[in-house]
Amino acid sequence: MSKVLVIGAGGVGSVAVHKMAMNPGIFSEIVLASRTVSKCDAIAESVKHRTGQIVKTHQIDADDVAATTALLKAEKPELVVNLALPYQDLAIMDACLNAGVDYMDTANYEPKDVAKFEYRWQWEYHDRFKEAGLMALLGSGFDPGVTSVFAMWLKKHKLKTIRTLDILDCNGGDHGQAFATNFNPEINIREVTAPARHWENGEFVETPAMGVKQQFDFEEVGPKNMYMMYHEELESLARFVPEMERARFWMTFGDEYIKHLTVLQNVGMTRIDPVMYEGREIIPLQFLKAVLPEPSSLGETTKGKTNIGDIATGEALDGSGEKTFYIKNICDHEDAYAETGNQAVSYTTGVPAMIGAAMMLTRKWRGEGVFNMEQFDPDPFMEMLNEHGLPWTVEELDAPLPF
Ligand code: NDP
């Protein structure tokens, strides 16, 4: 029985809070705070309607460390689940240290002015959390999050060592819009327009953004073009699975998405440096976000499935030589919407956020300091994925990917 305070009332925050409310044995009290309190109230209303549980709401600007510290001291939660934007990570970690509260998030800290996607800043908090006897868990979404737990599960149950790892993220959903992103557009477009990086022979190799394309036939979705890109779990996987010779991340994008993105990039609309407009500074990408559809508004019309998983090749645990395994989850957009009022991209992030929080509150995962998903026993997390809406399958493949 424990009290959790969630910060951020977007699609991911909404799913996580709904799923917490469905598990009152673990989350006995839920507080939701965000910049726009009306969004918190709308989620609380939906939770009450769907589950009968009460969610308390607050307005908070999480960039304001003093205000967040005061909120934490007043509410005294056991854990803060940060589902705001990556820009707020360090400010919320500071407030947690001030108030003596554990911390969890789903995306690594990003400075506003340059796209980095590095754990460096948050790893630097390790000693401070350790000295305070507190725990911080980083990246408990799907990717990052489940994709690392999948790799560690394969390493525990199937493979002695992982030689190559490919993470394949396919969103086969169709929202009926010419161009929209399925999660926060600013973060999504920063990720996609950044140079690709993959891990090979002990170092990251950089290639131009969207420069490497392959086709893959995704179960229950069909053949899709996928592009190699950088994703933050490659950094923690390279650190905690040091024997890997190569690790890559792939994401599918339709031709329409690429076409729109290319034009937006060519005309400068994806820039994240300030430009002067009518006497004031604006960031083009932030302006673009303001005119694009809200990801949370796409749920009602999105049809199709997501299919996200890991393909790992390495030495089999049973001594039978080199083997390849494919472990994945397939999630239906319409089912996710029916259950929580949000599409599958928010669902596949919000459910693992709830599970990561449950791991911490039930002390199945415990430590003092700052931790990544790879550092804990994957089994209790994998069990909860099966029980709470993200069932997974594992199969042996005849051969590694041919590319
Ligand atoms: P949204 O943009 O829909 O929601 C973000 C929420 O945070 C909004 O409610 C926003 O408030 C609030 N917020 C922003 N700034 C502040 C602030 N300074 N103080 C308080 N609240 C603030 O994003 P998503 O729900 O799609 O994503 C949430 C997080 O999940 C992001 O960090 C994203 O990167 C991460 N993510 C992780 C994935 C994974 O698999 N690991 C996949 C998808 C997302 P307002 O409503 O006022 O704008």
Image (cartoon, rainbow, N blue to C red):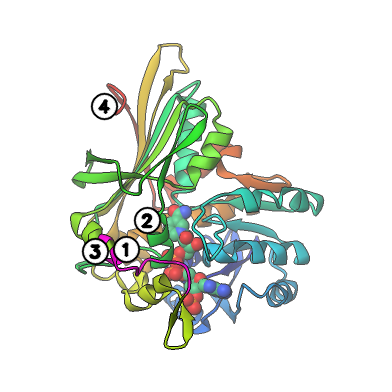
Amino acid marked by disc 2: Thr
Amino acid marked by disc 3: His
Q: Which residue is mark 4?
A: 402
Q: Of callouts 4 and 2, which one flags the residue occurring earlier in the amino acid sequence?
A: 2
Please determine whether, in this image, residue 396 is positioned above or below residue 359. above
**Residue 260, which numbered label?**
3
Does the residue tagged 2 have its C-beta within 8 Å of any atom of ligand 1?
no
**Is residue 266 inside the magenta stretch?**
yes
Amino acid marked by disc 4: Pro
Closer to the eye: label 4 or 1: 1
Q: For the residue carrying disc 1, how many other residues have a C-alpha within 10 Å: few (<14), some (14-19), or many (20+)?
A: some
Q: Tell me residue 214's x, y (percent).
A: 24, 39
Q: Which residue is mark 2?
A: 193
Does the residue tagged 3 have its C-beta within 8 Å of any atom of ligand 1?
no
Instruction: Report whether 300 appears left or right of 342.
Output: left
The residue positioned 44% from the left and 62% from the top of the image is 187
Q: Of callouts 1 and 3, which one flags the residue occurring earlier in the amino acid sequence?
A: 3
